[in-house]
Image: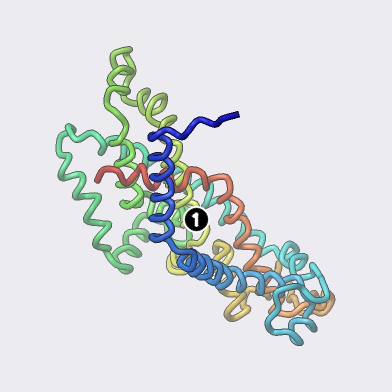
């Protein structure tokens, strides 16, 4: 059988493929990719190893911690530290407060941020520029701690759990990010709904919000993480230790151990001796206990996260 000679077009195509592959290799040599991967692996280890050390300490016995200050795997496995945490009323109460603040606060944050951003996405409203300056100026300049404290005191929010929810109800950065996303939605979609007789609230609820799942997930994640990790609000504006959020209680345990004696009015010394655990076990277990819940939310929102950031930054 005689094979047909290759046509000129095929030869040109192969030549262009070889040339493009060669140019790609010249632009990205193998050693460059190797260095990039080594740097990423190093940064990953720097981030992961401290968490592995804390996790291992929380699951190890006190004798193993004393013998091995730095460990990546648990020695003499035990769950006594976590048992102590779940049996300590002050920790569970602060955990409940933090969960309440995170859930209710994030819902209110999204409600007010969404409605304000939708209104500011309409440049034809009266006083549009003035309203935008009212959003931008607080993002650049803060009033300070003392005026903020006096304002919250006059509102009756000092020593109230609601101060953790209401304080910082709308973030200017998140508001502008969501407003930019709403701005990128074609006006023709909303106009077609208004022709059918839909009001502004109906357009927002039935048209805009279903198209805004990426930015809603992103902003909700921002607000949720901020509420969960909020430390200064509880420290400055709540003096009643029974209303402290988890982060303030965790600070007291890690730094001065002052909350270890607040397990429902009884001293924990006997419990610590009974469970054969030390303060190091409790510190490590408390850190894991306060970190894991918020980490569980990332896998469900990760697919929206990058998309929401990119789409919210299209227009400014």
Tag 1's secondary structure? helix
- Specify the quadrant of the image occupied by residue 45: bottom right
Q: How many marks?
A: 1
Can you name the residue that lies furthest to the front here?
2
Residue 239 visible within the image: no
Q: Which residue is denoted by mark 1 in the rendering?
A: 225
Residue 237 image offset from top left, x and y in percent: 43, 65
Q: Residue at x 29, y 28 (%)?
A: 186
Q: Residue at x 36, y 28 (%)?
A: 204
Depth check: give the residue in front, 69 or 22: 22
Residue 69 image offset from top left, x and y in percent: 69, 84
Q: Residue at x 48, y 43 (%)?
A: 304
Q: Residue at x 28, y 14 (%)?
A: 195
Q: Is residue 291 above or below residue 74?
A: above
**From the image, which quarter does the N terminus lie in?**
top right
- Specify the quadrant of the image occupied by residue 188: top left
Residue 38 is left or right of residue 152, and the answer is right
Depth check: give the residue in front, 12 or 247: 12
Q: Is residue 271 above or below residue 230?
A: below
Colour convention of the picture: rainbow
The crowd level at tag 1 (other Cα within 10 Å; few <14, some 14-19, many 20+) is some
Can you name the residue that lies furthest to the bottom here?
67
Residue 314 image offset from top left, x and y in percent: 30, 43
Q: Is residue 216 above or below residue 94?
A: above
Residue 58 is left or right of residue 14, and the answer is right
Residue 86 image offset from top left, x and y in percent: 73, 62
Residue 181 is left or right of residue 42, and the answer is left
Residue 88 is left or right of residue 308, and the answer is right
Residue 302 visible within the image: yes
């Amino acid at each position: 059988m005689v094979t047909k000679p290759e046509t000129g077009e095929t030869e040109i195509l192969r030549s262009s493929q070889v040339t493009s592959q060669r140019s790609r290799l010249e632009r990205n040599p193998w050693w460059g990719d190797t260095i990039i991967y080594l740097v990423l692996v190093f940064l990953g280890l720097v981030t992961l190893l401290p968490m592995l050390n804390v996790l291992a300490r929380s699951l190890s016995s006190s004798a193993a911690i004393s013998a091995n200050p730095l460990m990546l795997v648990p020695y003499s496995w035990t769950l006594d530290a976590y048992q102590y945490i779940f049996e300590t009323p002050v920790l569970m109460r602060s955990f409940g407060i933090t969960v309440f603040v995170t859930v209710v606060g994030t819902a209110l944050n999204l409600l007010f941020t969404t409605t304000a951003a939708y209104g500011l996405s309409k440049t034809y409203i009266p006083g549009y520029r003035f309203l935008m300056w009212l959003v931008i100026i607080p993002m650049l300049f803060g009033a300070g701690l003392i005026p903020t404290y006096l304002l919250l005191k006059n509102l009756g929010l000092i020593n109230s759990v609601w101060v953790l929810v209401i304080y910082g109800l709308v973030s200017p950065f998140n508001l502008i990010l969501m407003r930019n996303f709403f701005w990128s939605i074609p006006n023709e979609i909303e106009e077609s709904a208004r022709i059918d007789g839909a009001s502004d609230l109906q357009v927002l609820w039935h048209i805009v919000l279903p198209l805004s799942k990426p930015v809603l997930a992103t902003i909700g994640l921002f607000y949720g993480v901020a509420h969960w990790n909020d430390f200064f609000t509880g420290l400055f504006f709540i003096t009643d230790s029974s209303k402290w959020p988890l982060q303030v209680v965790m600070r007291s345990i890690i730094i001065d151990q002052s909350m270890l004696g607040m397990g429902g009015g009884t001293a924990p010394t006997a419990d610590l001796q009974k469970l054969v655990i030390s303060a190091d076990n409790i510190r490590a277990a408390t850190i894991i206990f306060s970190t894991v819940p918020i980490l569980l939310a990332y896998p469900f929102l990760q697919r929206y996260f990058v998309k929401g950031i990119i789409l919210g930054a299209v227009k400014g």
